Image (spheres, helix red, strand yellow):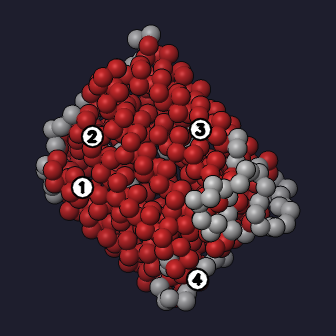
Amino acid sequence: MTAPRWISPRSPFAIRSYRFQWSADLMTSWAFEMETLILGWYIVVQTESVLLVTVFGSLQFLGTLIAPFFGLAGDAIGHRTVMCLMRAAYALLAVVLTALILTGMLTPVLALVVAGVAGLIRPSDMGIRNVLIGETMPEDRLTSAIGLSRITADSARVGGALAGASIVAILGMGQAYLMVVLFYALGTLLTLGVSAARVRDQGPAVMAASPLRGLWEAARAVWQAPPQLAAMVMAFLINLTAYPFTLGLLPYVARDVYGTTQAGLGYLVAAVAGGGIVAALILSRMGRAAQPARMMLVFSLAWHGLLILFGQIGSLTGGLLVLPLIGVAQMLCALPLSVLLLRSAPAALRGRIMGIRTLAVYGLPIGLLCSGPLIDHWGFPATAAAYGTVGIVATLLVLVGWRAHLWPKHAPGNVG
């Protein structure tokens, strides 16, 4: 299949495999966002507990500890194969939840159990997406491809969140979950169209004698590359101190801080995602001119500063003004971080290295679980201020510790 004439030959979309992958990622991301919003609101309404809301958010990242093994499996049998199996599993779990809803058997405990099972798989999804892009995309289009790929997740946060809230309000939770099943099924089918072949001749992958040995080789490669090691530290930091406020606590903020409805929650999610789309377009436009290490550090500082401001706002209108700025800052930090890792990762270790990067997501459930008791004890404004301050200080320490590798214009972390 040749690219349509209106697509530039230098665009990532000129590559057939990328068009299939982008579409598959979009469908899967829509399902993710609808499912998270529907279940998050169900938990907060049924239990009225901020602790259980943070537990629900944390369970979605339960599989971060085993994410490197998904990367290892991808290096062994192909990342497209692993992705297809993962997405078929999402669809099956959504069918189970739909059956529980339609039969009236769903309870908060069962919702948390299914979320926990899905959470064993979902954390690896974004990493394997990026690995597939790295395998099928020429080097000169890698940054643009990563930026455009992120639009699938952020546009889903806009459309999926608003659609999920609207469908639940109009048709009920059961009908909304039928839509989730449909999107997962489409995502699985489209993933089958992703190419298993690589654009660049990377040579045969040499697999280690054992899984643990393979993971050790990837960890050693990261440890010996200062820019990658710094990126791993930053990945853990932003998941620990920044992402909890936009990936787990928004149902609490909507209901208990702003006093709004499920529709209001959809607006908050969409505001963050709208900013993320703008950031992804900016990065895609910059292409190879982007300096990943510098951007990662600068926008981490901006992100944490905006979170401190967000915590002091007590109205829905104010939140909707600040959250798009947070969305811009978080994507201009997180996307260059991923580009930094992919650019310098050895081809045979790419899946395992991105799997180790997914381990950093474990900072998110830690941050979420700590935030619940802190909010109960200190209140939301003080907790946001504490998290933002810790994030700013830690980012500055990373800059000081790896300055020679991250800050100069021609430093390894800034040169493609």
Discs 2/1, front: 2
| Among the two numbered marks 3 and 2 on one chain, the one whose residue lies closer to the N terminus | 3
Q: Quadrant of the C terminus?
A: bottom right
| Among the two numbered marks 3 and 1 on one chain, the one whose residue lies closer to the N terminus | 3
The label number, if any, that marks residue 265 in the structure image: 2
Name the spot of residue 376 as percent of width and height, x first. Answer: 22, 44
| Among the two numbered marks 2 and 1 on one chain, the one whose residue lies closer to the N terminus | 2
Discs 4/3, front: 3
Q: CA distance from mark 4 to mark 1?
A: 37 Å
270 above or below 164? Answer: below
Discs 3/2, front: 3
Quarter assignment of residue 11: bottom right
* Residue occupying the point 83% across, 61% down: 205
Kindly identify the amino acid type of the residue bearing the numbered disc 3.
Gly
User: Horizontal placement of 326 versus 153: left or right?
Assistant: left
Q: Residues within 10 Å of mark 4 (few under 14, many from 20)?
A: some
User: Which residue has dot 3 on it?
Assistant: 187
Q: CA distance from mark 2 to mark 1?
A: 20 Å
- Looking at the rendered structure, the secondary structure element under dot 4 is loop
* Residue occupying the point 26% across, 33% down: 262
| Among the two numbered marks 4 and 1 on one chain, the one whose residue lies closer to the N terminus | 1
Discs 4/1, front: 4
Extreme top residue here? 103
- Looking at the rendered structure, the secondary structure element under dot 3 is helix
Q: Nearer the viewer, residue 5 or 279?
A: 5
Q: Are marks 3 and 1 in contact (CB under 8 Å)?
A: no
User: Which residue has dot 4 on it?
Assistant: 415
* Residue occupying the point 62% across, 51% down: 19
